[in-house]
C-alpha cells in the first residue's frame, strides 16, 4: 500500500512541494519522487519474503525481497529492492536460498534510480534527468556481488 499527496502540481500555481507529477496546459513530467513510488508499487499482490541484511561496511542500506508474477510475462520472479541512502557506492553480496528452482540470468533485470547530484530534479527542459534505468542482469544467480550507487534505489528482478 502506497500513497502520495499531493499528487499533481500545476507549474503556474505552486502551493505545495514536493509533488509527484508536474504539469502545465500542454506537457507533464514525473518527479524523482514519482519514480520511486512507481518502482515500489509495481509489485502488487506479491508475497513478502524473509530477508536478512548483513553488512560490515555500512548503515546506509535498506533492503526487502518479494516473490511475484511478472505483469507482462506471468513468470515467477524474486524482486530484491535495495536503497543506498549513503554518499558512497556500496558492495553487496546477495544470496538467495531455499528455492525450488534456479535463478535464470536470461530474463533477469536490474532497475536503478539514481543521479550524480542529490539535488537533481526533472523539469520541462529535461523531463528524464532522474528516471529509472532498466538493464539485463547478466550476473543473476543464487549468489551475486553487486555495486549500489550512492543515493540510489535498485530493484533486482531475478527470474526463477
Image (tube, rainbow, N blue to C red):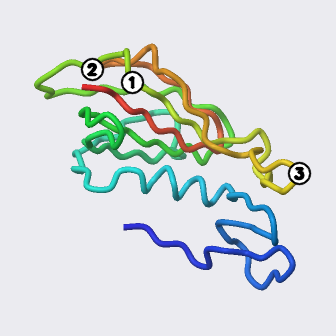
Q: CA distance from mark 3 to mark 2?
A: 41 Å
Find out whether the residues at labels 1 and 2 contact each other: C-beta distance under 8 Å.
yes
* Mark 3: few/some/many CA within 10 Å (<14, 14-19, 20+): few
The label on residue 103 is 2
Q: Is residue 85 above or below residue 14?
A: above
**Residue at the extreme front:** 26
Q: Is residue 22 above or below residue 115?
A: below
Q: Residue at x 39, y 24 (%)?
A: 108
Left of 65 or right of it: where is 90?
A: right
The residue carrying mark 1 is 108
Which label lies toward us, 1 or 3?
3
The residue carrying mark 3 is 125
Mark closer to the chain start, 1 or 2: 2
Q: Position of residue 135 (x, y in %)?
A: 54, 25
Q: CA distance from mark 1 to mark 3?
A: 33 Å
Q: Position of residue 85 (x, y in %)?
A: 60, 48
Residue closer to the observer: 36 or 24: 24
Which label lies toward us, 3 or 2?
3
Find out whether the residues at labels 1 and 3 contact each other: C-beta distance under 8 Å.
no
Mark closer to the chain start, 3 or 2: 2
Q: Secondary structure at mark 1?
A: strand
Left of 21 or right of it: where is 58?
A: left
> Where, quadrant-wise, is the C terminus in this rendering?
top left
Q: Position of residue 104 (x, y in %)?
A: 30, 17
Q: Residue at x 26, y 55 (%)?
A: 45
Left of 117 or right of it: where is 1?
A: left
Q: Residue at x 45, y 33 (%)?
A: 56
Q: Secondary structure at mark 3?
A: loop
> Where, quadrant-wise, is the N terminus in this rendering?
bottom left
Amino acid at each position: 500500500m502506497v500513497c502520495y499527496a499531493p499528487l499533481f502540481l500545476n507549474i503556474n500555481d505552486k502551493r505545495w512541494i514536493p509533488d509527484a507529477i508536474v504539469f502545465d496546459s500542454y506537457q507533464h513530467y514525473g518527479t524523482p519522487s514519482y519514480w520511486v513510488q512507481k518502482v515500489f508499487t509495481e509489485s502488487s499482490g506479491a508475497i513478502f519474503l524473509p530477508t536478512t541484511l548483513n553488512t560490515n561496511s555500512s548503515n546506509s542500506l535498506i533492503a526487502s525481497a518479494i516473490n511475484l508474477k511478472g505483469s507482462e510475462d506471468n513468470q515467477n520472479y524474486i524482486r530484491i529492492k535495495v536503497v543506498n541512502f549513503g554518499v558512497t557506492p556500496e558492495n553487496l553480496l546477495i544470496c538467495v536460498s531455499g528455492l525450488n528452482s534456479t535463478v535464470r540470468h536470461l530474463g533477469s533485470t536490474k532497475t536503478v534510480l539514481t543521479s550524480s547530484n542529490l539535488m537533481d530534479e526533472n523539469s520541462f527542459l529535461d523531463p528524464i534527468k532522474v528516471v529509472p534505468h532498466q538493464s539485463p542482469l547478466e550476473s543473476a544467480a543464487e549468489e551475486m556481488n553487486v555495486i549500489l550507487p550512492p543515493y540510489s534505489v535498485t530493484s533486482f528482478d531475478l527470474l526463477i
